Amino acid sequence: MGDTRLREAAELAIYAPSIFNTQPWQWTVRADTLELRADRTRQLPVVDPDRRLLTLSCGVALHHAVTALSGTPYEVEFMPAAAEPDLLAVVRITGERQTAGDAASRDAIRKRRTDRRPFLRAPIDQDLVAILTSVCERQGALLHVVRWDHVDVLALAAVRAGALQLSNPDYRAELADWTHRPPWSGDGIPLETVPKAVPRRVPVREFAPLGGAGLTTGPDNDWGALYAILYTATDTVHAWLTAGMSLSALLLAATARGLGSAPISDVTEAATTREQLRRLLPAGGFPQIAVRVGYPPVGEPPWTPRRLPSEVITDA
Ligand SMILES: Cc1cc2nc3c(=O)[nH]c(=O)nc-3n(C[C@H](O)[C@H](O)[C@H](O)COP(=O)(O)O)c2cc1C
């Protein structure tokens, strides 16, 4: 019989964001450990041929799980079995609950959602930027806030990534598949979460190139948004996992403080645009994903469905 605290952590981790909402993970709850495995059957062969964003998504889910446990002592072992590369991490509880933990981040797990609408003109206070940077860096990746006069480089990279990807029929087929999932699948990106196209500082991924985007936008155009690049010193599976954990920490901290957020990965999917981003970094490093954070317009963006616990959690 699995530990109920670990079972609950796995259930909360279902809310984690993932590339194209593929939810590419499998959890096994044991008496004293929780195992996280990559689910290769959910890889996106065109967008993510190296499984980098699949692994990063698993890192996000792992951080969600340990945030659910926060207050209870635990340890995480990364990739414990060389013979089983898909076993990405094992979480082990090492004692009884000691403190309330980070309740704000835990509560943010259910509240957070990717907000693709343009954010308001109001800028984010520098103290808040410092908090977002430090929560990220505590998980192992680094956060580079894109300078005001470098945002146009990011914008050009986004335009280029969009042109490269949309001119590829295999990409268009993969995109169409994951934006037109049957309602019972509990995965993919519903077009109600995609805003109608409007001019904005950095173009966002076109999820509905043939039309059908349903979300109305507010009056602004991301003028106050913070753009940042999460990067790592190496480009290994472990680095991808830590980038995912850092992304999760950033998104939950932002949500807990009333900020909207949206990951931006198209600019790191093509080698050429990833290189453009790399040149923005202060001391080299490998860009893993970009993110947009800011004050959202009124109203919540719609909720994106998830798979059932029985599809992703096994009690061993
Ligand atoms: C690794 C990764 C890459 C992502 N890339 C993008 C992206 O390029 N554009 C975007 O709008 N959302 C992106 N997302 C957000 C997902 O589409 C979103 O998490 C998923 O559809 C579930 O919706 P939710 O975050 O509202 O729960 C990404 C998320 C992750 C974890």
Image (cartoon, rainbow, N blue to C red):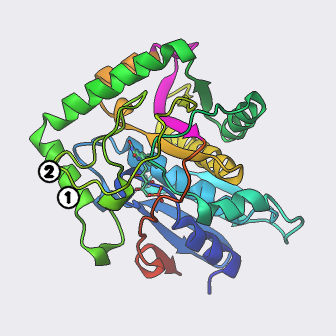
Up-down: is 53 above or below 93?
above
Residue under the point 36% across and 30% down? 267
Dots 1 and 2: beta carbons under 8 Å? Answer: yes
Q: Nearer the viewer, residue 261 or 312?
A: 261
Residue under the point 44% across and 73% down? 312
Q: Residue furthest right?
A: 98
Up-down: is 290 above or below 39?
above
Question: Residue 216: horizontal and vertical position, in percent?
Answer: 39, 53
Question: Residue 76: horizontal and vertical position, in percent?
Answer: 67, 55
Q: Identify the amino acid type marked 2.
A: Ala
Residue 273 — which label?
Answer: none
Horizontally, is 130 left or right of 145 in the view?
Answer: right
Residue 177 — which label?
Answer: 1
Secondary structure state at the residue bearing disc 2: helix
Residue under the point 52% across and 40% down? 119
> Is 284 colored magenta in this rendering?
yes
Q: Residue furthest bottom?
A: 1
Q: Is mark 2 within 8 Å of ligand 1?
A: no
> Is 167 colored magenta in this rendering?
no
Q: Identify the amino acid type marked 1.
A: Asp
Q: Residues within 10 Å of mark 2 (few under 14, many from 20)?
A: few
Q: Quadrant of residue 184?
A: bottom left
Q: Residues within 10 Å of mark 1 (few under 14, many from 20)?
A: some
Spatial CA span between label 1 and label 2: 6 Å
Q: Which residues are magenta?
A: 279-294
Q: Residue furthest front?
A: 219
Residue under the point 56% across and 33% down? 225
Question: Residue 52: horizontal and vertical position, in percent?
Answer: 39, 41
Q: Residue furthest left?
A: 169
Residue 173 — which label?
Answer: 2
